[in-house]
């Protein structure tokens, strides 16, 4: 009874769109809302190094474990002079992004949360959100924004 009341309250408090998990999105510059939020569950059994094809990228180390299939595909319909993807989770997560021009990884963009920011070419980007322990699964959100942060962290594309 308490669980159904809590679930009902959460469902009423949040728009239906925010309930979607593992959503794929298509965006253009000046998208709205900004930040755009997508949700998922991190983790898997595949080492991030295997998915990325290396141990480190210019944006950070390829660490943790991901699922074989990407959590999201983000289709960029035009060039972005600046776009940031920032993961927020109650647990320490990692990210692997593969698309036009290469593959990028990150561990700690802001605190324990991973992210990647900078210029992005048009095209499809596969996004994996990883967990540090194999087959450990944690909820997360990814905030996508064109707004530059005052302190964006040490890793940028």
Image (tube, helix red, strand yellow):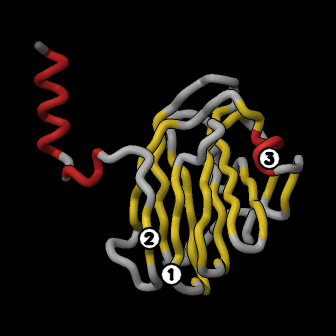
Q: Relative to 106, does residue 89 appear above or below in the rendering? A: above
- Image coordinates of residue 134 in percent, x first then y, are 69, 24
Which residue sits at x=87%, y=52%? 56
67 shown above or below 60: above
Q: CA distance from mark 1 to mark 2?
A: 7 Å
Q: Write down the quadrant of residue 44 in the picture.
A: top right
Residue that mark 2 sits on: 26
Name the residue tied to disc 3. Answer: 62
Q: Single out the mark in the foreground, 3 or 1.
A: 1
Taking the spot 39% from the left edge, 65% from the top edge, the residue there is: 36
Comparing 6 with 99, the one in front is 99
Is 5 rendered above or below residue 20?
above
Q: Quadrant of the N terminus?
A: top left
Where does residue 72 sit, x and y in percent of width and height?
Answer: 52, 53
- Of labels 3 and 1, earlier in sequence is 3
Quick one: label 1 or label 2, which is nearer the N terminus?
2
The residue tagged 1 is: 77
Tag 1 and tag 2, C-beta contact below 8 Å? yes
- At x 85%, y 50%, the residue is 53
> Residue at the location (41% across, 67% down)?
35
The image quarter containing residue 51 is: top right
């Amino acid at each position: 009874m308490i669980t159904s009341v809590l679930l009902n309250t959460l469902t009423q408090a949040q728009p239906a769109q925010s309930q979607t998990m593992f959503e794929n999105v298509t965006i253009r510059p000046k998208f709205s809302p900004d930040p755009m939020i997508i949700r998922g569950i991190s983790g898997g059994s595949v080492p991030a190094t295997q998915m990325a094809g290396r141990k480190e990228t210019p944006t950070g180390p390829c660490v943790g474990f991901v699922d074989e299939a990407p959590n999201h595909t983000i289709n960029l319909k035009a060039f972005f002079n600046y776009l940031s993807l920032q993961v927020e989770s109650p647990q320490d997560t990692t990210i692997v992004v593969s698309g036009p021009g290469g593959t990028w990884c990150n561990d700690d963009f802001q605190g324990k949360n991973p992210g990647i920011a900078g210029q992005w070419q048009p095209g499809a980007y596969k996004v994996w959100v990883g967990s540090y322990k194999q087959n450990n699964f944690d909820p997360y959100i990814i905030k996508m924004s064109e707004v530059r942060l005052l302190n964006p962290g040490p890793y940028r594309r």
